[in-house]
Image (tube, rainbow, N blue to C red):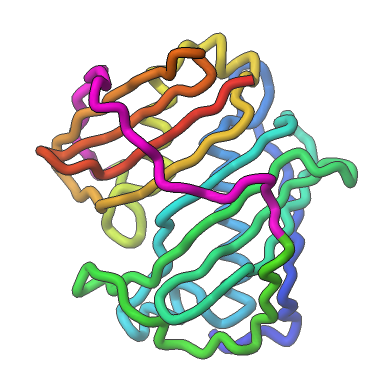
Amino acid sequence: MPISPNFTSVLSKDWEINFTQCTPTGYLKYTDLCNLLQLTAAAHSEVGGISFTDMQEFDQAWVLSRMRVEIKALPKWQDIVTVKTWINSLENSRSVRALEMYVNGEKIVGSETFWAVFNTKARRPEALALPFEHFELYPENRATEEGFSKININPEKESVFEKTVYLSDLDIVNHANNVKYLEWCLDHVNPKKILKQEVKSFEMNFLKELSLNDKVIIHESDNEEQTETTFSITKGEKTCFALELHWK
């Protein structure tokens, strides 16, 4: 699609929280929070002419490599949330995008995301084939207090679950959707901590893609102060994903 006449380098989009996105307490699930952030990023790429459809002409797609989410509060059922997004940096095969979520004008979530251009046939990163100079960049305008980082995995981690990748786990790029990794791990957190909204922030590192019928192991470890929980997902000897949860 061509660049929209309504294109702006900073996009704000409203979403209504529906009941399918909520936990039994009526508040937004962490997985659906990530979905809303990514849907807003996708909407911005569409009006800017660098969407999945545009990129597929060159067998390319954006894939998420790292993500940090800082949470002040979660929205609840029927809330109207505004998600605002802009790009911090964009060059060659990678981009850093900022996202913020607001309710009634108050910022409740900030997120920093790191994206890579991925060739969906060669299954490897490569330089973006589309023009992007029309995007104004905002390198100093950060959405989070801390940036994303490389997650350190405790070698003493405990295996908690074995999982096979099913068709329902795959997305349009034909690999396990990034939110699925988060969902698999959160299923092994004490439900009370989730329902009481005790997650202060979390980071995710996406290291290797997973495909249909891949068999993986989910591992868990806590730091001594019990202020952080780290999950990792391995296929054979290789780590495919890491998640670090920071507790209130």
- Along the viewing direction, whichever of 149 and 110 lies nearer the viewer: 149
Residue in view at x 47 percent, y 48 percent: 149
Of residue 56 and residue 116, the one placed in the foreground of this image is 116
The image position of residue 39, as x and y in percent, is 57, 56
**Image side of residue 190 versus residue 14, left or right:** left
**Residue 10: quadrant of the picture:** bottom right
Q: Residue furthest right?
A: 105
**Horizontal and vertical percent position of residue 172:** 35, 60
Quarter holding the N terminus is: bottom right
Task: Identify the image quadrant of residue 189.
Answer: top left
Up-down relation of residue 221 to residue 116 (above or below): above
The residue positioned 50% from the left and 74% from the top of the image is 51
Q: Is residue 202 magenta?
A: no
Q: Quadrant of the C terminus?
A: top right
Q: Is residue 56 left or right of residue 214?
A: right
Q: Residue, x 58% and y 30% (percent of image)?
A: 29
**Residue found 71% across the figure and 51% down from its top:** 100
In-image side of 195 versus 173 (left or right): right
Quadrant position of residue 166: top left
Please give left or right for residue 60 compared with residue 112 in the image: left
Report if residue 148 lies within the magenta region. Answer: yes
Above or below residue 88? Residue 104 is above
Q: Which sits in the foreground, 184 or 166?
A: 184
Vertically, is 23 above or below 130? above
Q: Main secondary structure of the magenta part?
A: loop
Q: Residue furthest front?
A: 224
Q: How many marks?
A: 0
Residue 102 in picture, x, y percent from top left: 79, 45
Q: Residues in magenta?
A: 142-167
| Residue closer to the observer: 158 or 4 | 158
